Amino acid sequence: MVVINRINLNRSSYLAITDQPDDPRLQSILEELKTRKKTFQTLVYSQPTNKVKLKKALLDQTIGCYLLIGATPINVREIVQTALEYHFTHLDMFIFEDEPSVKHVFCGCCHFIHDNVEASRFVCKNCGQLIEVSDHFSHYYHAVLGFPNIQ
């Protein structure tokens, strides 16, 4: 369930991008936008056929548009990268991302990203620090944050 108060509802227009038609993650937000009489469009994104449609939709947006992105981690990465290329910022986006099937952990000590981590604690391959895996997913690093276990 999405907490609507975490989404910027003060923008003039919105573009909802999802990889599923009738995405349940976006329904409550779109209803709230209708209630507030906000302008919004939706785009169903599936790679690779809609990459051109995504670029056109991003180009057609007015300044101040807010992106609502709901997709799998791979599609989120592609959508966000394309939006950044078209001069959107991370502040212009709200991302509803499915849980990644493979857990990547970002070492908070040396910034190394570990692939395929299953343990809740492990030793960083890069810096040797004992790392505790958090439940905080970073959309910037596309990984779960791991904090050094300092004793």
Image (tube, rainbow, N blue to C red):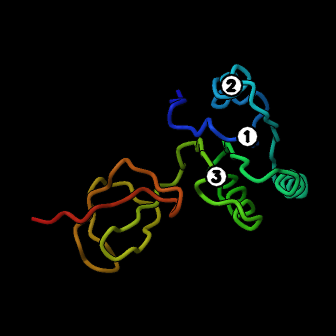
Rendered view: 128 above or below 56: below
Q: How many marks?
A: 3
**Residues tagged 1 and 2 counted as in contact (Cβ below 8 A):** no
Rendered view: 5 above or below 87: above
Name the spot of residue 37 as percent of width and height, x first.
75, 25
At x 69% / y 24%, what residue is drawn?
36
Q: CA distance from mark 2 to mark 3?
A: 19 Å
Q: Say which of 22 and 105 sits in front.
A: 22
Is 55 on the left or on the right of 33, as rendered? right
Specify the label residue 129 is tagged with: none
Rendered view: 7 above or below 138: above
Q: Say which of 123 and 107 sits in front.
A: 107
At x 38% / y 58%, what residue is drawn?
145
Crowding at dot 1, Cα within 10 Å, few <14 / some 14-19 / many 20+, comes out as some
Specify the label residue 27 is tagged with: 2
First-in-chain label (1 vs 2): 1
Name the residue that disc number 1 marks: 12
At x 67% / y 44%, what residue is drawn?
69
At x 79% / y 34%, what residue is drawn?
39
| Res 15 → quadrant | top right
Mark whose residue sits in front, 2 or 3: 3
Is 64 on the left or on the right of 54, as rendered? left
Name the spot of residue 95 as percent of width and height, x first.
60, 46
**Residues tagged 2 and 3 counted as in contact (Cβ below 8 A):** no
Specify the label residue 92 is tagged with: 3
